[in-house]
Image: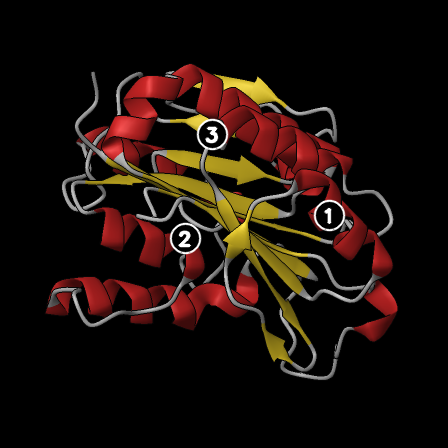
Amino acid sequence: MTTLALGAALYFDYELASDPLPLINLWSRIATQAELCSWILTPKGATKPVDFDATQLVTRIESGVTTTVCIETRNRDVTIIAGTARAASLDRRPPAPRWSYDLAVALGDERVAALGQDAIVNALCDFAGAVAATAGVVMWSASLDFARALAVLSSGPDLRHQHVSALVEAQVNRSHWGNVIRGPEWGTFLSAPLVAKLEGRALPAARTVQLTSGGAFVQVTAEPFDVEAPPRILADLREALAPVMGSSGG
């Protein structure tokens, strides 16, 4: 049983307002508690958390009113945040990122143990394939706060100095993701064009999953490792992924 919390992030251009099924499928597989709450962002601001009502939330997503939705437990040991704005309403003026939408997931260690590592990764891979993710990562940390911060790329008052430094470094590289990978990390998502660039290269990894979009998920080791203590094989994978790393290093 893992003792680490999970943080995951995916970047994509798929308009969930037109078809929220990929998000519905994801939350139905990893947000399985009886007691959940949800909140949304709109152009006018944020709503207060309310009891989770899947039908009502889907209606809000399809209406195009929301820009972001969040589903989580009251103690935040499960968090799913996704961008759901209509594509036509997005402000794509520079310095807009390469992608249109983000998905962030954070799961506490007990939730990971209850769901099972493979079930979580498979759910994320299915979502990534359905939305043709351009980049993404899955990471593990002894700190749920740090795992969540890595997923949403937002700091908090309880993070240690080195955690804040890691977030700042990620933000520096953020504008490149999609054209290059984010990572590599324990789990790294590749878009179909980046997979094509790597054709014929052997990757040192425990598992590679082909996505329905033509992209791939590369998992470095069978078991999780803390993002703060990466094994040597991660450096080997970084070297093998050089054609899609970019000059910025990710």
Please tell me whether residue 126 is drawn above or below residue 142 in the rendered image: above
Q: What's the coloring here?
A: secondary structure
Which part of the image, by quadrant, shows the N terminus?
top left
Q: Which residue has dot 3 on it?
A: 34
Which structural element holds mark 3? loop
In space, the residues marked 3 and 2 are separated at their CA atoms by 24 Å
Instruction: Look at 57% across and 47% down and name the residue there.
Output: 135
Tag nearer the camera, 3 or 2 = 3
Please tell me whether residue 113 is drawn above or below residue 12 in the rendered image: above
To which quarter of the image does residue 66 belong? bottom right
Residue 94 location, x and y as percent? 68, 83
Q: Which residue has dot 2 on it?
A: 151
From the viewer's perspective, tell me whether residue 202 is left or right of residue 159: right
Instruction: Look at 32% across and 42% down and name the residue there.
Output: 77
To which quarter of the image does residue 229 belong? top left
In space, the residues marked 2 and 1 are separated at their CA atoms by 26 Å
Q: Is residue 210 visible?
A: yes
To which quarter of the image does residue 162 belong? bottom left
* Disc nearer the start of the sequence (3/2): 3
The three-letter amino acid code for the residue at tag 3 is Ala
Q: Which residue has dot 1 on it?
A: 56
Confirm or deny contact between disc 1 and disc 3 (CB under 8 A).
no
Instruction: Look at 41% across and 53% down and name the residue there.
Output: 151
Q: Is residue 180 visible?
A: no
* Disc nearer the start of the sequence (2/1): 1
Crowd tier of the residue under label 3, counting other residues whose Cα lies within 10 Å: few below 14, some 14–19, many 20 or above: few
Instruction: Look at 43% across and 16% down and name the residue there.
Output: 118
Which structural element holds mark 1? helix
